[in-house]
Each structure stands twice: as C-alpha cells, then as structure tokens.
C-alpha cells in the first residue's frame, strides 16, 4: 500500500501553525499615504493568519468630514438597517451616508459580506445643550444627573443662558464623545443584525472575514490616504470568525489590534459593564478598546500610565523599585486590578495623533519596532516592516510591559533605552526617548 | 533534477560549487524545497540566497556539509532541526533561530528575535547584536552533544529559562559604561547547563533557580574558545573581550520543581 501522506504532503506541513499578525505605521509629521503599504506588509505575514479575519484602521482619511463622527456599520439584514437608520435620525444629524465602497467579495477572495454602510453624523445642538445643563447641575443648584442617564426635559427652568453656553463650549468634545458612546452601545446591544464597528472622527475601521491583504483590496484601501494605519491578520482561537469579530476593535477614535488572548476577559468585562461598556462582538479584544477609552479619555491618564495598568510590572519587580515609582505602581495595581490584562498579548492601540505598541509583561507574543525619519513602524515580525521600508534607521525587539508611543509632532517614546545593535546609527532627531514617557 | 522540485532558478553556478538564488516573492516552501534539493547535489558547497524577506523555516531539517548565506531578513524558526550546515545571516534574524537544532552553525550579523536557540540540542549559534526574550529557553545536552549560544550584546527577560544543558554566553558589548544587562528573571527554572555573563548584572535580575559563582576549572578555557570564534566571525579583538570578568550562573538544583506539589513546600521554592 502506498504511503499517501508521503506523496501528497512530503514535509508534513499541513498542520496550521499560525497566530495573529499585527502591523502599524505612522508618520509622526502627519504625512498622509495610501493603504497600499499596510496591505503589502500584511501580505508578507500571510502565513501568520488563516484567512478567518483581517482588518485595518486608518486615521486622517475623511478630511472633508473631519468634524463628523464617521459611523461604519455592518448589517446582517435590511430590517437591521432600517431600524438603525430610524434610530440615527432621532439621535444624530446625519450629514451624509453611503455604502462603504468595496469590490465584489466573490472576486476579492473574502467571505460573503454583510451590508456595509457609513454615516457621517453630528451630535444635534439641542442635545448638547440639554446634556450640558444636566452636567452643570452638579455645581449650579440644578438637579444632579449623569449625562449617560438621559436628557432632562425641564430646561425651561434654566435662565442662565450664558452659563450654559460656556459649559457647552468647555465640555463640548467630552459631552459629544459620551453621547456617541451611548448611542453606539444602544445600537450594538439593542438593534438586531446591526453592529457599529467604527465611530471616530476623521478615521475608519475596515474589516471582515478573509486574509488581510484581500480585505484591504476588497475595501479599496489603496484609494484612502491616512497618516496612521494599523492592520491585523486573524487566527481565531476561542471564538468564531465573523465580520464583526475581525480586528481592529474600535470605539470613538480608539482602535485596537491584538495578538494573543485575554485570560482575564470575564473580570475585565464585568468591570467595564459597570462603566457603561457592553461587550457584544464575541471576542476578548473588545475589552481592551473599552478599557483604553475609560482610562485615557474618561480618567485622563496618559498613555504610558495606561500601559502600566494593562500590563503592570510583577509585584516582585515593584518591590524593588525606588520611590516614588514603587508607590505609583502599587497605587495603579490597587486602583485598577480589574483592568489588568492577563495572559499572552501584543496590542497596537491607536487614536487620533497617537500609536502605541505594547507586549504583555512576560513577553509571550512578539513585537518589533522600527524607525525611519518621521515614520514609526510596529509589527509582529521585522520582515513586513522591511517590505515597505528596506532601509530602516533602526529596528529592535520591544520589551514586555514597555510601551512604544508615537505621537504627532515627532515624539517617539520607548521605555527601553539602549537596547540596540551596534550596527545601527543614532536615532533620528525627530525621535525623543524617555524612560517613562512624560 | 526534476522541474517539480527545482522551483527557484539558480542564478549562477560557477565551478567552485557556489550557487545563488533570488528569494524575492518566493514562498518558504519553494525556497526550502530548493535548498534541500541543492544540498544533496554533488559538487554544491555553498548556496547564497538574496532578497530573503520573512520566509519561515529556512534550512529546516537541512543536512550535510553545506554553507548557506542569507541576505535580508529570514523569517521565524531559521535552521529548525538543522543537522550540519552552516548558515550566515547578513541582516537581522527573527524569532526562534535554531529551534531544536541538532548540529551545525548559525551566524547572525545583526540581532536575533525572541526564543533564539530554543530547545537547541547541538551545534553553535553566534549573534553579533542582541537577542529578544526567552533566548536559550530549554537548551539541552546529551553526552558529547553540547549546544553553544554566544550573544555579543544583551538579552531580554527570561534568558536561559528552563535551561537543561549546554552553554549560553552574554558578552554585553552593546552596553554602555556601567550599564546593566537588560534581562530580568535570568535562568528562571534553570536545571542544567551553564550561563556565562560578561558585563554588569544585579542579583535581582536572576531567577530563583540559579546560583552565581566565578568561572572555575576549565570554564575560562571554554569561554576563551567561544569568544575566539565570536571575535573572528565579527571582527573583534578577543583579548579585549576576555580582559573583563565573567560571571557564571548554574542551577541550584537539578530538579528545582521536585517539591512543587508537596504540601507546605511552596515557600521554600520562591519562584521568580
């Protein structure tokens, strides 16, 4: 009898040995470039994924609607679309809406696609005013109410118009962001077959089921220009592959791409629900996006501190720290134990003007960084970076728990100074390094 | 030679037994099939591969006395299970260099990523620059088979984790004056083999499983041999490197976890 396996598979390599692949690139000067490079980089890491999820996040791509929230929504039925659009008409000023341009899924090598639509919306002025009044109530003798609890209807009682206007201007962004988060959660938890997968200003997430390079091609990303791109190739391990479950995960302009698994998902999720974040994408990565929104936007923590909440040093390391670092890290672990992301992970977080790479503290997933002039690259492997930038100024393996932070304005911060091969020259003058960021 | 097997064009095959391949745009399967085919061909002694960019498993299970020169950035698990050949990397290597390698030599003229020399069981790996985390994890030895890893720079955390045999050397050449090695938790779970470190390291950087000593017996001779080969490969002055002191790390116990599941024994273990 013939040994069929020796004929059809001589090297025994049909076993799927894969894992997620991450990539990010950013011009710290804000130069915009097409999605082509990110697609090429992901194609180089084709073997890391298995075609069950790919996606991209791009920043600076909607300058013509820069002041609008761009809601990308996927619908699994027309009813879902109708109900969502009805809801949107009552909650937003919809400035423009259209199908998200894409190629034919059948010819793009991607799975059958849901209905993909995008809406450029503003928060209605009267909503702003009403929320602001209820907020000012905290110190203005007006009935106390959280903005997330809804809109008060007794604004006629208020006569201090000047104070209201001032309050609106002071907190406009904050109020609007909270309002949008609430509506996104309402759609995602309340309307069947509808999922908002992108909700920031002047940015967008494009994702689905397929290899990342095919997803990029499907969404025509070569036609968009952004100054920051992140990308993901998925190898789903714990949950099913579906369009909403692909990465990046996003809320407002936060996006997260993730390689690994969040073993602490249950704890993280329960804590976030207490703060108004509801997990409905059936995968662990979602909690990171919400945790970052809570810590950085609502609790105003700088990103290097956020990184220390998500990936804190081990207690044995904290015990050895000099003061006041020891006290700081102790306080962070005691304040946010439920936002510690346990388990193996590497993530690339992005928001408007900022890209952050982070590995778990015991370094169970890979992350490589590279710098060339004003460009910062983050990737699961070095080769994809060299695909788009063969002559890097420098490249290095990122240390666990130490964030790499690129910011508009030319700052690249790494917590790990001096870990560099002697064959590389000094950092370009655009890069500033500091042991702990700020 | 069949057309099915020979998928990469041989660019040059001069009489000296040297052949050149262009790996641009080629999958790791194509590349490795070609390498295997060439390695067994009579008269071929050196294969140069240009435009290497992320192809995994290069040289996996490759055997024989052949030299492979890689120009570019080879992908993960370079030289896995390799048995005999010598690979030169003119660039950086990614994760898993020499995974479970059996014999032969890998020389990296840049940095290597995480888990370099993982489960290595024989042969030598020389890295000019730095290595990532968990390098030399679970290196092992048996009888005459003793693997060697020499790193010119420094390493990330968990260097020599669960190390069971062989020799791993950190030279610290990339560290500034007075700077400490980057790795923490060095030798966590180590229960065999030896680590030699040149350059500063604080006891707090070591895992609970290791003890520190000065090199003794024929340790210095073996270090000098390894440093001599390293210096020759990368153009250093061996005498200058040997001028500084080395520290020896070895396991406190050959069975550090033997008592792990015994009642009341956790306190004495002090896992890092």
Image (cartoon, rainbow, N blue to C red):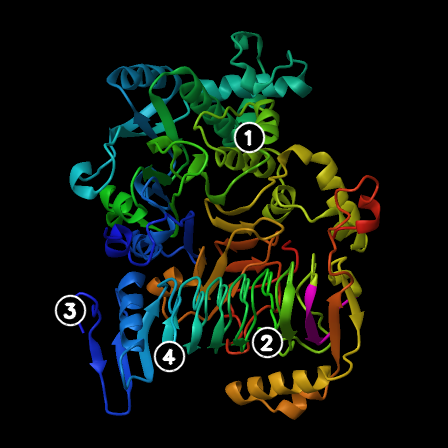
- Residue at which label 1 appears: A171
Report the magenta stretch's main SS: strand
The foreground one among A321 and B9 is: B9
Secondary structure under the numbered disc 1 in the rendered image:
helix
Secondary structure under the numbered disc 2 in the rendered image:
loop
Q: Which residues are magenta?
A: B192-202
- Residue at which label 2 appears: B144
Q: Residue at x 37, y 15 (%)?
A: A90
Same chain? Circles 1 and 3: no
Residue B3 is labelled as 3
| Left or right: A168 as drawn, with respect to B9 | right
Q: Residue at x 81, y 53 (%)?
A: A323
Q: Residue at x 28, y 88 (%)?
A: B17
Q: What crowding class fits label 3: few (fewer than 14 Cα within 10 Å), some (14-19), or many (20 or more)?
A: few
User: What x and y, as percent, mark residue A212?
Assistant: 32, 46
Q: Nearer the viewer, mark 2 or mark 4?
A: 2
Q: Please give the chain letter of the residue carrying mark 1.
A: A
Q: Please give the chain letter of the residue carrying mark 3.
A: B
- Residue at which label 4 appears: B69
């Amino acid at each position: 009898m013939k040994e069929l396996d020796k004929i059809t598979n001589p090297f025994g390599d049909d076993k799927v040995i894969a894992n997620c692949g991450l990539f990010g690139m950013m011009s710290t000067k804000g130069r915009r470039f097409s999605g082509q490079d990110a697609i090429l980089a992901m194609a180089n890491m084709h073997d890391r994924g298995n075609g069950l999820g790919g996606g991209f996040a791009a920043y600076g791509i909607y300058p013509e609607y820069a002041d609008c929230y761009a809601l990308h929504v996927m619908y699994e039925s027309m009813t879902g679309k109708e109900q969502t659009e009805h809801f949107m008409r009552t909650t937003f000023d919809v400035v423009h809406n259209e199908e998200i341009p894409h190629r034919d899924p059948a010819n793009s090598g991607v799975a059958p696609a849901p209905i993909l639509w995008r809406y450029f919306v503003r928060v209605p002025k009267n909503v702003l005013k009403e929320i602001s009044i209820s907020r000012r109530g905290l110190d203005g003798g007006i009935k106390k109410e959280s903005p997330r609890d809804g809109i008060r209807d007794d604004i006629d009682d208020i006569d201090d118009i000047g104070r209201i206007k001032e309050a609106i201007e002071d907190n406009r962004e904050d109020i609007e962001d909270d309002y949008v988060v609430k509506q996104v959660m309402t759609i995602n938890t309340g309307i069947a077959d509808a999922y908002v997968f992108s909700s920031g200003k002047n940015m967008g997430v494009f994702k689905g089921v397929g290899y990342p390079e095919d997803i990029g091609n499907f969404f025509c990303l070569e036609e968009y220009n952004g100054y920051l791109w992140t990308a993901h190739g998925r190898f789903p391990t714990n949950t099913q592959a579906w369009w909403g479950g692909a990465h990046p995960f996003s809320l407002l302009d936060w996006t997260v791409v993730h390689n690994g698994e969040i073993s602490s998902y249950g704890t993280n999720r329960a804590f976030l629900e207490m703060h108004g974040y509801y997990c409905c994408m059936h995968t662990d990565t979602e909690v990171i996006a919400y945790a970052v929104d809570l810590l950085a936007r609502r609790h105003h923590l700088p990103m290097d501190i956020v990184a220390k909440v998500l990936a804190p040093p081990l207690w044995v390391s904290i015990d050895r720290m000099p003061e006041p670092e020891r006290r700081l890290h102790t306080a962070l672990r005691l304040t946010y134990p439920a936002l510690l992301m346990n388990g193996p992970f590497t993530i690339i977080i992005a928001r408007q003007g900022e890209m952050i790479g982070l590995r778990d503290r015991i370094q169970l997933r890979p992350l490589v960084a590279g710098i060339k002039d004003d460009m910062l690259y983050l990737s699961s492997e070095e080769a994809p970076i060299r695909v788009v930038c063969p002559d890097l100024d420098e490249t290095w393996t990122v240390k666990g728990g130490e964030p790499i932070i690129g910011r508009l304005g030319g700052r690249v911060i790494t917590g790990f100074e001096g870990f560099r091969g002697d064959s590389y020259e000094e950092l370009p003058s655009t890069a500033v390094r500091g042991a702990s960021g700020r | 030679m069949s057309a099915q097997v020979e998928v990469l064009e041989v660019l040059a095959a001069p009489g000296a037994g040297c052949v050149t391949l262009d790996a641009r745009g080629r999958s790791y399967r194509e590349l490795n099939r070609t390498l295997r085919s060439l390695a067994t061909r009579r008269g071929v002694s050196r294969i140069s591969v240009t435009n290497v960019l992320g192809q995994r498993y290069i040289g996996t299970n490759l055997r024989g006395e052949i030299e492979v020169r890689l120009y570019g950035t080879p992908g993960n698990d370079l030289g896995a299970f390799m048995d005999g050949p010598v690979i030169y990397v003119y660039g950086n290597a990614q994760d898993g260099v020499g995974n479970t390698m059996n014999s032969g030599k890998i020389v990296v003229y840049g940095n290597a990523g995480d888990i370099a020399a993982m489960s290595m069981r024989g042969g030598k790996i020389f890295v000019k620059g730095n290595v990532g985390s968990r390098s030399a994890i679970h290196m092992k030895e048996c009888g005459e088979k003793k693997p060697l890893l020499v790193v010119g720079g420094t390493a990330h955390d968990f260097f020599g984790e669960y190390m069971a045999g062989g020799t791993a050397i950190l030279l610290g050449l990339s560290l500034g004056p007075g700077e400490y090695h980057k790795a923490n938790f060095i030798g966590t779970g180590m229960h065999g083999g030896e680590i030699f470190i040149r350059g500063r390291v604080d006891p707090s950087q070591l895992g609970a499983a290791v003890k520190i000593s000065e090199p003794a017996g024929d340790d210095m001779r073996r270090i000098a041999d390894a440093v001599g080969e390293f210096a020759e490969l990368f153009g250093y002055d061996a005498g200058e490197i040997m001028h500084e002191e080395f520290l020896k790390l070895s396991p406190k116990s050959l069975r550090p976890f033997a008592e792990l599941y015994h009642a009341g024994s956790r306190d004495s273990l002090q896992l890092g």
